[in-house]
Image (cartoon, rainbow, N blue to C red):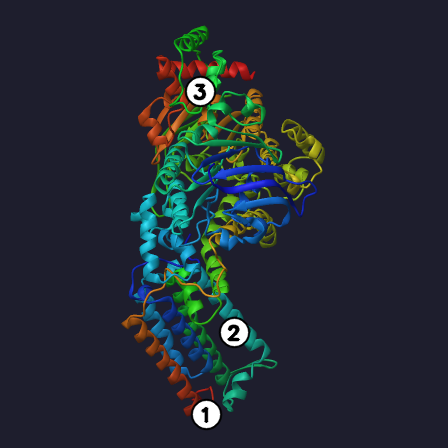
Amino acid sequence: MEESIISFKNFGFKYTAQAEPTLKGINLDIHKGEKVLICGPSGCGKSTLFNCLNGLIPASYSGDATGDLIIKDNSFRNLDIFSLSKITGTVLQDSDGQFIGLTVGEDIAFAMENDIVQLEEMKERVVEAAKKVGIESFLDHAPHELSGGQKQRVSLAGVMVDDVEIFLFDEPLANLDPASGKKTIELIDQIHKDTGATIIIVEHRIEDVLHCSVDRVVLMGEGSIILDTTPDKLLSSDSLIKNGIREPLYVTALKYAGVEIKEEMKPGMIDSLILSNQDKQKIKEWMESIPDKPQVDDRPLLLETKDLSFSYPNGKKALKDINFSIKKGEMMSIVGRNGAGKSTFCKVICGFEKESEGKIYLSGSDISNLSIKERAEKIAYVMQNPNQMITKPMIKDEVALGLVLDGRYSEEEINKRVDEALKVCGLYPFRSWPISALSFGQKKRVTIASILVMRPPVIILDEPTAGQDFRHYTAIMEFLKSLNEMGYTIILITHDMHLMIEYSDRAVVFTEGEMIADSKSEMILTDDDLLEKASLKRTSLSDLAKLVGVDETMFIRKFIKFDREVRK
Amino acid sequence: MSGVFNYINRKSPIHTLTGASKLIVLILWSLAAMTTFDTRLLLVLPVFSLILFKISGIKYKDVSFVINFTLVFMILNNVLIFLFSPEHGVSIYGTRHVVWNGIGRWTVTKEQLFYQLNVVLKYIATIPIVILFVSTTDPSEFASSLNRVGISYKIAYSVSLALRYIPDIQREYHEISVAQQARGLELNKEKEGLIKRLKCAATLLFPLIVSSMERIEVIANAMELRGFGKNKKRTWYSSRPFRKGDYLAIIASSAIMLISILLNVVNGGRYYNPFI
């Protein structure tokens, strides 16, 4: 019998502000040195469970607990957030927001400062912790000089200065591009091996976490534990899809091909997957059954840039000679690592920033001289965070704002357009609600509705599905697809490879202010050089194709095609 | 963004002074400038502060916004002094040399002009040193120096966090404002009246407050998780030992303070009176 370090005993929790308990009857034992993945859709209670372990409940969020939670032989009732912080080290989701210090060194030292550790010892321990996560050469850097992945390493080093026995990771992949996400998972694995600590990862991107092995997966739904099992067992069942969690792509592909997934096949990781010759044959046959004739796209060009360049006032060149084009009615992606110029490019197109050189054409006419507002009637931009766009407390007022400010529209016309946009966005039933009552995804729809009333032919969305679980991701993307089918041209700025595969046929890659590729999604997803520059990674479809012995690009192309048909 | 009140990281002898000694200099210096109305000292201090500015490598354009802001404030202050007590100089210096008879009670006297000259000099003597302090002191060092002079570290840290978030919030304000302009909100100077523009700017506050609240929740949780507030005291990673320069700076500013007190004694009051 292994020693339990965490033990939930018929544990329940209800927030003071809520009528219903968020957690119900949780029984869960986590053993010393185990690596456990906790997954579940938004609102399933995984964050609440997480905050019970680090003490933010009840320190920051009050409520009533029932049952018991034992952490290292102590009931949580006898532990406060400060004593817990010596046992559990928490890495929060928002690597930007949790950066407290002004430099890397200072941030790592934060916990020690609060423990009144003397300067000399502090400096030594900072260097030691920084070395463990490989950021020792960045100690004097400010947060804005770091990438998302590096910031996360700093947070990790910040909890490693104390010899904590339990590491808690709250959605460690949420704000990272796929390439950095992969490195993070590898780093967590490394720490697990080196320190023998207990690791708990809360995340709904199962496929990415399972890049390195975990001992157990706990699946949560509606405040309870639905399943507590090994990855192999989990992936040979259909519990994930049933509970609104995305399956790994290779699992989806196997199912499409009619391969029955059994536990013995070790489907928990693509690297461990065993396929019989019969299974491989099935996959090949499935692949051959999908027709592959190149489609001719003869739609007219809508938006085009010619040698577009942009420099910041301080002279730093942010965009170099971009020649970009999109056809009328297309839905495509712009990919690239943070700071590669994707958002800057879109901001220049929208007139938020003024280009230094080059021209922008819409349906063949030069729009370089139009003001922000005039361009917005033609090209709309939806920011990543809807809270940055919403200025009115009521939904209807927010959606109507653009038309009201314009002043050219009658009240009747405004009402007509607002109702129409609300209906398209599925918000009509909520039209007289206050915006504060809406979820994040619904707020996003409000921001989209508020630009739809202006009827711009082109809509640019910055990371439309960031931070969304599978159900909300699907809802948002299907909605955007329906807009696309209605004739809107849609540009997506994204890091999400699922989004590329499922919703965009074509993508352009930005790196260091240059557009280095303009290609089919499957071509980008199989080109190592481009993947590296775009901060993406190979999908598990490539690995599956290799395992079966078929051409990767062809395999992905056919998968995309089949997947679209299934979705219809 | 340039011209705002913020820490500017450059390499200079002033940047290398510890936050604590800079804070002490700031306090002594402003006390000295505040207690005295001695024109001779008030003429010397601005010259010193300009020299310090030169040494610090901070340029006018780095801090133009706050300088212009205080200039406007200073002018307003002077106009109000004249409006409300045009004879204040006379009552201080005890003589009355009329320069211009003016309208009604608003007579311009040499004494009043001299008094207001002193007010202006006080501004010029203190403001640059405040700006210099903020722009050459790293916010966390600022917090640690506040803590060193006896202020609770919790208060000190919240002040430094607030200073630190100024650039973030400005960036966010810019993002929000372009997004709103795209929806037809006019923030351009030429096109709309001041009142309307202010109204428009006010609508931008709503999203700014919402996102700032989110930011505060995250940082507060992160701090608490890492033991902030656990003990009565804390140490500071950014604290540095006092060096020769620090002692020099403190001695020099103590000297200024001393001169200011001496002048008070010699003049028999706060004012230097050239009219007798």
Specify whether residue A140 is in view.
no
**Could you tell me the amino acid type at mark 2?**
Asn
**Could you tell me the amino acid type at mark 3?**
Tyr
> What residue is shown with label 1?
B268
Distance CA(mark 1)–CA(mark 2): 26 Å
Specify whether residue B215 is in view.
yes
Distance CA(mark 3)–CA(mark 1): 90 Å
Q: Quadrant of residue A198?
A: top left
- Give me the chain letter of mark 3: A
Q: Nearer the viewer, residue B95 or B69?
A: B69
Q: Nearer the viewer, residue A485 or B220?
A: B220
Can you tell which of label 1 and label 2 is closer to the viewer?
1
> What residue is shown with label 2?
B78
Q: Nearer the viewer, residue A168 or A249?
A: A168
**Could you tell me the amino acid type at mark 1?**
Gly
Rate crowding at label 2 as few (under 14), some (14 to 19) or many (20 or more) other CA atoms within 10 Å.
some
Q: Which residue appears at 58% of the width and 21% of the height?
A: A486
Residue B9 lies, in percent from the top left, at 35, 57
Rate crowding at label 1 as few (under 14), some (14 to 19) or many (20 or more) other CA atoms within 10 Å.
few
- Decide if residue A490 is on the left or right side of residue A314: right
- Residues at badges 2 and 3 in contact (C-beta under 8 Å)? no
> What residue is shown with label 3?
A250
Rate crowding at label 3 as few (under 14), some (14 to 19) or many (20 or more) other CA atoms within 10 Å.
many
Q: Which residue appears at 50% of the width and 70% of the height?
A: B75
- Decide if residue A79 is on the left or right side of residue A546: right
SS for tag 3?
helix
Can you tell which of label 2 and label 3 is closer to the viewer?
3
